[in-house]
Image: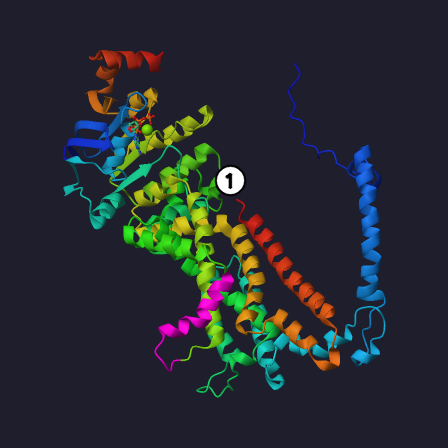
Amino acid sequence: MSTFKFQSSKQPPKLQMGVIDWTMKNLFSSKLNIALSFGAFYLLYLIIPPLLDWLIFSADFTQKSNAECTKEAACWSFIRAKIDFFMYGLYPSEYYWRVNLLLLITLIFMLIAIVLKNHIYKNRGILLMLSIYPFIAFLLLYGSETFAIKIIQTHQWGGLMLTLVVASVGIVASFPIGVFLALGRQSKMKIIKVLSISYIEFIRGIPLITILFMASVMLPLFFTEGVNLDKLIRALIGITLFQSAYIAEIIRGGLQAIPKGQYEAADALGLSFTQKMALIILPQAIKASIPNLVGASIALFKDTTLVLIIGIFDMLAIAELATSDPQWLGRKTEGLVFVAIVTWIILYSMSRYSKKLELRFKR
Amino acid sequence: MKNIIKINNLNKWYGEFHALKNINLEVGEGEIIVICGPSGSGKSTLIRCINFLEKFQQGSITIDNTVLEDDVKKIRQIRSEVAMVFQHFNLFPHLSIIDNLILAPIWVHHKSKQNAQEKALKILDRVGIKDQAMKYPNQLSGGQQQRVAIARSLCTSPKIMLFDEPTSALDPEMISEVLDVMVELAKEGITMICVTHEMGFAKKVAQRIIFMDEGQIIEQNSPDKFFNNPKSERLKLFLNQILG
Ligand SMILES: Nc1ncnc2c1ncn2[C@@H]1O[C@H](COP(=O)(O)OP(=O)(O)OP(=O)(O)O)[C@@H](O)[C@H]1O
Ligand SMILES: [Mg+2]
């Protein structure tokens, strides 16, 4: 009698594909593909070398002034000369350290959040950081008389720093409002429901520019005379109101993806409405919405450039301003390319990070 | 035997549709009841009325001397004593098994986290999946998930347990592991109302079997009489169908 033997598991065969296999399969698999591939190569040949030449090989990096940039290529000396302006706007240079310190604190907080990942104090730690961060940021960027920190008026803020402030305040502040609007839209109470729906649909029906104009022109009308609301604050309010309507719709999508059974199980356990929402429904809805939330945040980041219309100098507006310096006339392209590169780096990291989050939550 | 559930002339409509018609039912403390009947006969609706997952329009339900009414506090109090196990488990996928179990003890019954965890581990041990405590629901098989769901409802020490077809979403080889847990439970004196088509289970543990059709209780009897001496034609037909 022969006994049955279980076979031991083996490694799956490797799917190897060499460079040649890959090119043959992806670029030259048919006549049409061959033609398209060569066409594309030719276009790249037309574009890439001159572009690289302009950007790097013939570019000037070390010249002291505009006049010394003689070649038909980028004059990065312009950016070197103006880099502080691009980063901080008109923020007084002796206080740059305050902005840098805030950046450092931000990075440290992020690091702590990553290190805490599976620690029992994770939630408490993150909550604590989230609640003290706005005060630290306010004290460092704006200042305070009581703490004898010199006040830097917001009209002196500008550049990348301002872009980051506007975008992050907009993204963070709109989130809780959006969540409440989304819940309101599903509410059984008619008034709340109608109010939420009207708000969301009203805001989504008008462009951000209009809202910014309204915020800068109309908001002051609501306040008693004498109270002069800061221009930046007005813009932030406008952006937050705008973004929260979109966040609400995204969260609503996440809520709709939650099966009815989750509500019933929470109810059957005797959880209250608030507990059910906070512990069961919203965590799942928000996780499901992360890709869309990041998408909306990226869109908002780009839209923040519109604040230049109401006279706030974000990085793009600064690029514009910097080239009007008589010493550096005609260096607009360099300014715009620089802004584009910086923006791309930030937004690309955001989207990479969201990919990572998605993978982590995919359980 | 003291009655723990009293249902009096219960009527329930979904819009125009009369889903429950004049239901009268009394359940004694510690009694094990099985409800069966064809699809759409109102079995789920009936047991979902008992913990107020469904509202009803007429009649009354009294649980442990508390009359069920549309009042948030009362409903929560009833629900903290009446546990329910669903056909599709309805575990919380974003929480680990242990966190699924300690949720209600902590938030509804205000137990300390440590207390809740100790009890949860004991109960997981009882249903035979203590070693899975740190996993997440969709890392478990259907049978294991349903045992977790049973464990979750046990963590609040309910007086009454409602089961709505707990095995009908499971692969055949997993049904018995869940039924075994339920049989063990039945021995412990907890009041159980099970909607199920597992007639073997019904014969083994039920003290009373109820047959429903078209929103009404057609017949109820002890298992012996229910299977061997059905009175109504409809029950005979039903038994023929499911017993083959
Ligand atoms: N939310 C609802 N809205 C409208 N009608 C419903 C709703 N839920 C159930 N019904 C109807 O009420 C009747 C009873 O449903 P119920 O779910 O209680 O049946 P059941 O006996 O549990 O059936 P099954 O064995 O298929 O689970 C069915 O005819 C069903 O179509
Ligand atoms: Mg049912």
> As rendered, which of A9 and B53 lies closer to the eye?
B53
**Magenta span:** A208-227
Residue B127: say if magenta: no
Residue A214: say if magenta: yes
Is the residue A61 above or below the residue A267 in the image?
A: below
Q: Quadrant of residue B36?
A: top left
Q: State left or right for residue A55 relative to residue A267.
A: right
x and y, in percent, of residue B79 in the image: 26, 44
The residue at 42%/47% (across/down) is A255
Is the residue B206 above or below the residue A116 in the image?
A: above
Q: State left or right for residue A218 relative to residue B194.
A: right
Identity, as a three-letter code, of the amino acid under mark 1:
Gln
x and y, in percent, of residue A309 in the image: 55, 70
> As rendered, which of A321 and B49 lies closer to the eye?
A321
Q: Chain of mark 1?
A: B
Residue A192 shows in this picture? yes
Quadrant for ligand 2 reads: top left
Residue B111 shows in this picture? no
Instruction: Classify 10 Å Cα crowding around label 1: few (below 14), some (14-19), many (20 and above).
Output: some
Q: Which residue is mark 1?
A: B139
Q: Quadrant of residue B46?
A: top left
Quadrant housing the N terminus of chain A: top right
Question: Total of numbered circles in the picture?
Answer: 1
